[in-house]
Image (tube, rainbow, N blue to C red):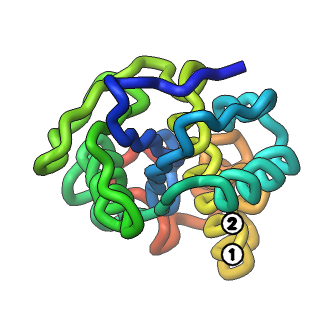
């Protein structure tokens, strides 16, 4: 079971992103503030959960969280500012959308982050498999991104986005080779 991350009683927001390694679509990020005594036996890194579990736990997270927000940065902006900067920008946007409570400390999944104005942070490698609020953020970011990819897969049905979610599967790369790129593809990535 994952634990809360405690920094001397400060109000903490966990942050994570989804879709960094994809060839198409935006990168999504979430920020989540959980109640201090919240625990859950099954919430963990979204990659370790089935799609059905992620949606089930998303409902729980959205109901119990003190505050939460999800934001995205488009594939065009990813091409302009690079994927790392875009992922950090998406996290900043999500943090900025927290309206009920201002966090006093941020815990970030990974080892790279740019300071959010006025809020100290701690980067934690594999934080989504260590701390509840980061795991919760990973679930929200992943489910909202998956829903976006399923929606645009109806517009471009030949790329398999409803299944591969834009990741570089062999079918996705074959579709790019045969059909070309769409407006949702990240032109700065190696697509083939």
Of 97 and 185, the residue lying toward us: 97
**Helix, strand, or loop for circle 1?**
helix
User: For the point 28% across and 54% down, which residue is it?
Assistant: 92
Depth order, front residue of 130/146? 130
Q: Which residue lies most toward the left here?
A: 117
Q: Residue at x 69, y 32 (%)?
A: 39
Q: Quadrant location of residue 41?
A: top right
Residue at 51% of width from left, 71% of height from top?
A: 182
Quadrant where the N terminus lies? top right
**Disc assigned to residue 147:** 2
Residue 94 x/y as whole percent: 38, 59
Instruction: Please state if 10 lies on the left or on the right of 64 as rendered.
Output: left
| Residue 74 visible to an observer of this rendering | no
Residue 28 left/right relative to 173: left
Percent of width and height locating residue 25: 50, 62
Q: Nearer the viewer, residue 137 or 63?
A: 63
Q: Is residue 26 above or below residue 129?
A: below
Residue 39 appearing in the image: yes
1 or 2: mark nearer the eye: 2
- Which type of secondary structure does the marked residue at label 2 adopt? helix
Spatial CA distance of label 1 from label 2 is 6 Å
Foreground of the two, 72 or 11: 11
**For the residues bearing labels 1 and 2, Cβ distance under 8 angstroms:** yes
> Residue 155, how many percent across, how many down?
67, 81
Question: Which residue position is annotated with label 1?
Answer: 151
Q: Residue at x 60, y 34 (%)?
A: 37
Percent position of residue 135, x then y: 59, 35
Relative horizontal placement of residue 182, taking residue 71 as reference (left or right): right
Label 2 Cα crowd, 10 Å radius (few <14 / some 14-19 / many 20+): few
């Amino acid at each position: 079971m994952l634990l809360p991350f405690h920094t001397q009683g400060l109000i903490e927001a966990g942050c994570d992103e989804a879709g960094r390694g994809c060839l198409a679509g935006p990168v999504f990020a979430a920020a989540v503030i959980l109640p201090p005594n919240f625990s859950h036996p099954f919430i963990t890194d979204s990659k370790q959960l089935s799609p059905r579990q992620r949606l089930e736990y998303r409902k729980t997270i959205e109901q119990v969280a003190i505050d939460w927000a999800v934001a995205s940065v488009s594939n065009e902006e990813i091409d302009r500012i690079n994927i790392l900067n875009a992922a950090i920008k998406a996290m900043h946007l999500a943090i900025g959308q927290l309206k009920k409570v201002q966090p006093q400390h941020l815990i970030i999944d990974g080892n790279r982050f740019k300071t959010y104005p006025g809020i100290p942070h701690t980067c934690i490698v594999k934080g989504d498999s260590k701390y509840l609020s980061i795991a919760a953020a990973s679930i929200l970011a992943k489910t909202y991104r998956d829903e976006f990819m399923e929606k645009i897969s109806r517009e471009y049905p030949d790329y398999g986005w409803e299944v591969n979610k834009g990741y570089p599967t062999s079918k996705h790369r074959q579709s790019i080779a045969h059909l070309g790129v769409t407006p949702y593809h990240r032109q700065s990535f190696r697509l083939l």
